[in-house]
Image (cartoon, rainbow, N blue to C red):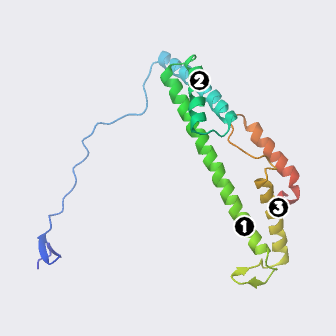
């Protein structure tokens, strides 16, 4: 059998000679627009206007909270109608669709965060049920009483997150000030843990 033949299922098949792929023959696409100063001013004005519409629409969607499918459709229809007065129907549709997508992504992220929070609390609680330095079945307690105590404080902190003490959070659009307020409330309540 020659080195150019391979046995596959009992039959020998020839292997093609190696080859080099041809260089790409496509056209080059540039992402940077070369515009005149007047066109640039128009693009910035349009961008600012659409950005302000998008921000207002996202804030309006977040204020509505959780909606079922019919509620989402009704909300989007009303918001699109309001935005169409200040822009084209096509842009209004795009803005409302993007706002809904952003809201749904934020809601899924918060739900996932809540799930991991519960898992961490369950894990710490399981290990706290075992005395320090001991084992019960497959569960080992924390190595030292000091580590066990620090984990009880950590569990209280996580329970505070879960119970909404820094704020039962939902997706919101607005300034950083609101999130900063939640953080300051959290730090004040748990300053002995945060240091």
Gap between marks 3 and 1, in whole Å? 12 Å
Above or below, comparing residue 73 to residue 16 in the picture: above
Depth check, mark 3 against mark 1: the one in front is: 1
Res. 28 image quadrant: top left
Above or below, comparing residue 144 to residue 171 in the picture: below
Gap between marks 3 and 2, in whole Å? 45 Å
Question: For the point 48% across and 23% down, which residue is it?
Answer: 90
Gap between marks 2 and 1, in whole Å? 47 Å
Q: Which mark is residue 122?
A: 1
Give the position of the C terminus as an image quadrant. Answer: bottom right
Res. 26 image quadrant: top left
Res. 151 image quadrant: bottom right
Q: Is residue 41 visible?
A: yes
* Residue denoted by label 2: 48
Give residue 40's position: percent from left, percent from top. Answer: 50, 20
Above or below, comparing residue 139 to residue 180 in the picture: below
Identify the mark nearer the N-term, 3 or 2.
2
Q: Residues within 10 Å of mark 2 (few under 14, many from 20)?
A: few
Identify the mark nearer the N-term, 3 or 1.
1
Q: Is residue 173 visible?
A: no
Depth check, mark 3 against mark 2: the one in front is: 3
* Residue denoted by label 3: 156
């Amino acid at each position: 059998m020659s080195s150019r033949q391979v046995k596959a299922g009992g039959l020998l098949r020839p292997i093609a000679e190696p080859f080099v792929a041809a260089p790409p023959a496509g056209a080059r696409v540039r992402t940077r627009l070369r515009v005149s100063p007047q066109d640039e001013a128009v693009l910035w004005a349009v961008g600012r206007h659409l950005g302000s519409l998008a921000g207002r629409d996202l804030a309006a969607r977040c204020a509505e909270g959780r909606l079922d499918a019919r509620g989402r459709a009704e909300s989007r229809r009303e918001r699109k109608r309001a935005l169409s007065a200040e822009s084209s129907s096509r842009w209004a549709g795009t803005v409302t669709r993007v706002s809904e997508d952003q809201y749904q992504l934020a809601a899924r992220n918060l739900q996932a965060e809540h799930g991991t929070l519960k898992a961490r609390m369950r894990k710490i609680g399981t290990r706290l049920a075992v005395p320090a330095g001991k084992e019960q079945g497959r569960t080992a307690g924390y190595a030292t009483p000091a580590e066990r105590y620090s984990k009880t404080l950590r569990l209280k902190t996580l329970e505070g997150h879960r119970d909404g003490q820094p704020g039962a959070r939902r997706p919101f659009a607005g300034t950083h000030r609101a999130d900063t307020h939640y953080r300051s409330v959290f730090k004040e309540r748990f300053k002995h843990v945060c240091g």
